[in-house]
Amino acid sequence: MPSSEYAYNDELLTRYLLGDLPAEQAEQLDELSVVDDEFAWRLNGVENELVDGFVRGELEGETLQKFQSVYLASPRRRQKVEFAAGLFELEKRTALQAASPKPTKVSTDRWGWLGAISFQQWGFAAAAVALLLIAAFLFTDNLRLRRQVDQASSNSSQHEQQLQQELDRQRAANAEIQGELDHARSAGQDLSQLKTVSLLLPPPTRGVGPVQSVAVHPRTDLVAVLLTLESDDFPQYRVALKDPATQREVWHSPDLSSSSAAGHMAVAVSVPAKLLQQQHYLAELTGIRRNGATEPIGDYPFGVILR
Amino acid sequence: MTKNRTPTQDAFRQFLDWLDEGRGSGGEKYLELRRRLVLYFDRRNCLTADELADETLSRVAQKFQEKGEITNLSPAHYCYVTAKYVFLEYTRRPEQGQTSLDEFPASRTSDGTLAVAEPADSESAAKERTLDCLERCLKKLASGECELILEYYQGEQREKIQHRRLIAEKLGLSANALTIRACRIRNKLEACVRSCCEKS
């Protein structure tokens, strides 16, 4: 395959980087990415532009969605994004420094009248200004200290309340999982030796957060995954587990309702551990309206480590 | 899977020469191929991309040492074919690249209770560390390289394209050659920042 066919097709290369090409085509590009110098450098350039586009907020629509769900699923690629963000920040700081006004020279003619004031008069004026500044400082500092004392006492009780709420929500989430297990038990499964691991995933965001991993022991039966919601807008939800490399659906949940977990609303699913391999996965969350209409909410990437 | 395949110094030098295909890159080609293999495995969502790239090159070096020459495929192509086999083995052997359970705060075994993973440090601290490392690594670049990388990424959209055209003219390079030079510097800088962040 001539590499020039692909060398300047940025859109195709972007789709390749986002795992959006059919397997056969992706494999052809895999090969070129290793064996063809021109292609490898072009791909390197397109990847840099893609990552820079993300940190500058230029990506949108499906490209942005794929970037968040597929590209950011790898720790190495997230490091690349962090680096690009650093480069961008440095560029902003440099531009800001260049744009800041330089001190201007004062014309001595224009301000020459100052010279007419005597040294003694300057001394009195300076002392008066200093006294005024000290008085103003003491006054504002007093106010600040008072505010801090008031805030500290109110924060203390607020913090206690927050902790209590958090604890209540945590208990409710545990009860939810326990409920699922009870339900499975009542369905006739032998759960006396059931072993689970669980993972709480934050809502998908634009930021470069760490992709969380869960370690699965050979004797683990269930992996409980809690998908935190940014807002609880649907009466029911459905979760599909996908392989980000192939977009193949590995498993999907029945219709679920949300519950409270660790201070946030979340959708909890229990995935049979035997279905999972050592790789990254995407938990694709869909909202279901009362009339049955479905709406995609977001992709939650996570990794599985087989122990 | 891993056997003792450490080649002798002479054998390794011959292997590097073969990878170079007579260009005398002084090991650059080896490093570049390794980088591409790491990216290949990473795009396939392998958790141990670095190890798999090393495993691939190690197998190719061993094969080269055994046969004395490999003539049916170019060195890069041979490495790619070997990488495909290494990848297949990786997918069939899930125990490859195991990481201790203790290294993952998210994955404590429980009897139904939640295990919430906490990031190693806060986002802002990580950002500051990256910036700090970036500034340090920029200082390590040759002055021409440092200027080029900072200028190359300046501006947005059309302004950036125009800016790059001017840089290429100034340096007497084609647009493609400038992209490659910028990529090389950026890769070097990225590797330095990654190593610096890991150390700190």
Image (cartoon, coloured by chain):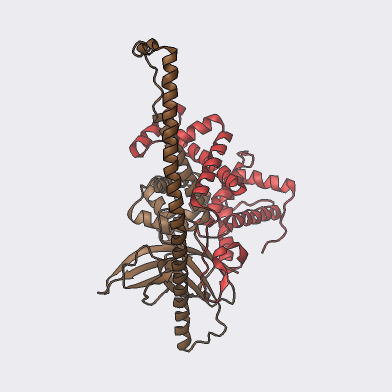
Q: Is residue B36 above or below residue B140?
A: below
Residue A161, position as x, y percentages in the image: 44, 65
Locate residue A14, reporting x and y percent: 40, 51
Residue A131 locus on image (x, y percent): 44, 28
Q: Closest to the observer: B172 or B98?
A: B98
In this view of the protein, can residue B116 be seen by the observer? yes
| Extreme-left residue of the structure | A291
Foreground of the two, A57 or B171: A57
Residue occupying image coordinates x 40% and y 58%: A21
What residue appears at the point 47 percent right and 49 percent down from the top-left corner?
A: A81
Q: Is residue A48 visible?
A: no
**Identity of the residue drawn at 49% across and 51% down:** B123
**Residue appearing at x 47%, y 65% in the figure:** A163
Q: Is residue A185 left or right of residue A258?
A: right
Q: Quadrant of the N terminus of chain B?
A: bottom right
In the rendered structure, the colour chosen for chain B is: red
The hue used for chain A is brown
Quadrant assignment, res A130:
top left
Could you tell me residue B184's position as x and y percent? 52, 40
Please tell me whether residue B109 is drawn above or below residue B75 in the rendered image.
Answer: below
